Image: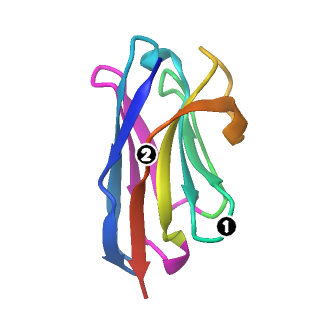
Amino acid sequence: QVQLVESGGGLVQTGGSLRLSCAGSGRTFEFRNMAWFRQAPGKEREFVSGVSWNGGSTWSADSVKGRFTISRDNDKNTVSLRMNSLKPEDTAVYYCAADGRLHSSGSYYSSEYIYWGQGTQVTVSS
């Protein structure tokens, strides 16, 4: 069982930056890939960025490459998402998620992630 709690959302102007954090609990946190997803009003939830269980690899959606950076600290059971050069289209509720598999390859698919946080709102004003 993994429990996840996000923090760090808020209101920012276009071009600004935010850092989201996700605090995890559970003995298997360090063995699971982690990811951030987001959902804008009226749209489906979409993948943003992922990090492997050991932090050795990351993968991101094309829409955020070069702007967002995901990282993790397994000693602290945390995952972070640094978001730079924010755009109004980045406005969404951002969710932290943990892969249901252990020591697995990376995935972009929400169906692979079975543990989810409650979400944190990010609003980018134009």
Amino acid type of the residue tagged 1 in the rendering: Lys
Q: Mark 2 and 1 residues: CB-CB less than 8 Å, in contact?
A: no
Kindly identify which residue carries mark 2. 118
Q: Quadrant of residue 99?
A: top right
Label 2 packing within 10 angstroms: few (<14), some (14-19), many (20+): some
In the rendered structure, the answer to whether residue 5 lies left or right of residue 93 reads: left
Residue drawn at x 69%, y 60% is 44
Looking at the image, which residue sits at the far top?
Answer: 27
Residue drawn at x 44%, y 40% is 117
Label 1 packing within 10 angstroms: few (<14), some (14-19), many (20+): few
Q: Please name whichever residue, 11 or 44, is drawn nearer the observer in this view of the structure.
A: 44
Tell me: residue 38, above or below residue 116.
below
Q: Quadrant of residue 4?
A: top left
Residue drawn at x 39%, y 16% is 26
| Residue 50: x %, y % from top left | 56, 40
| Residue 49: x %, y % from top left | 56, 47
Quadrant of image for the C terminus: bottom left
Residue drawn at x 33%, y 60% is 9
